């Protein structure tokens, strides 16, 4: 059985990075967070979490984004 998903929001960061927030339709409260870069077709899974509020969501992203960018650059942007 296939489930529909939708991008709920995008959080833009520095140097072309952004985080896509994806949720199942209809929403069950759980969201997936994907690190993306505007010049890359690659996405890297960051984490899943239940949605509480925007402030908590932003805090969760801010707490992991620098580490995830380093991982993204090491693994997905190799030339």
Image (cartoon, helix red, strand yellow):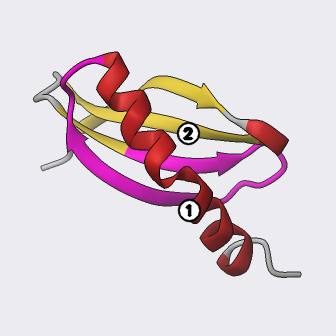
What secondary structure predominates along the stretch shown in magenta? strand
Q: Which mark is residue 15?
A: none
Quarter location, residue 41? bottom right
Q: Residue at x 30, y 28 (%)?
A: 56
- Where residue 42 appears, x then y in whole percent? 66, 59
On the image, the x and y values in percent for residue 6 come to 38, 28
10 Å neighbourhood of mark 1: few (<14), some, or many (≥20)? some
The mark nearer the N terminus, 2 or 1, is 2
Residue occupied by mark 2: 19
Front residue of 2/49: it is 49
On the image, numbered disc 1 is attached to which residue?
68
- Can residue 6 be seen here? The reply is no
Secondary structure beneath disc 1? helix
Name of the residue lying farthest toward the top: 54
Q: Position of residue 59 (x, y in %)?
A: 40, 34
Q: Which residues are magenta?
A: 33-53
Placement of 76 over or under 66, stated as above or below: below
Residue nearest the viewer, comparing 57 with 79: 57
Q: Image point 57% across, 28% down: which residue?
A: 11
Crowdedness near tag 2: few (<14), some (14–19) or many (≥20) residues, C-alpha within 10 Å: many
**Residue pictured at 21% horizontal, 28% vertical:** 51
Can you say whether 43 is above or below 8 in the image? below
Q: Quadrant of the C terminus?
A: bottom right
- Inter-mark Cα distance, 2 to 1: 11 Å
Q: Visible in this render: residue 68? A: yes
Q: Is residue 47 left or right of residue 51?
A: right
């Amino acid at each position: 059985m296939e489930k529909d998903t939708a991008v709920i929001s995008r959080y833009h960061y520095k140097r072309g990075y952004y985080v896509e927030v994806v949720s199942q339709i209809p929403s069950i409260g759980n969201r997936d967070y994907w690190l993306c870069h505007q010049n890359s077709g690659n996405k890297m899974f960051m984490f899943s979490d239940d949605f509480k509020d925007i402030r908590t969501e932003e805090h969760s992203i801010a707490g992991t984004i620098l580490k995830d960018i380093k991982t993204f650059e090491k693994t997905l942007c190799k030339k």
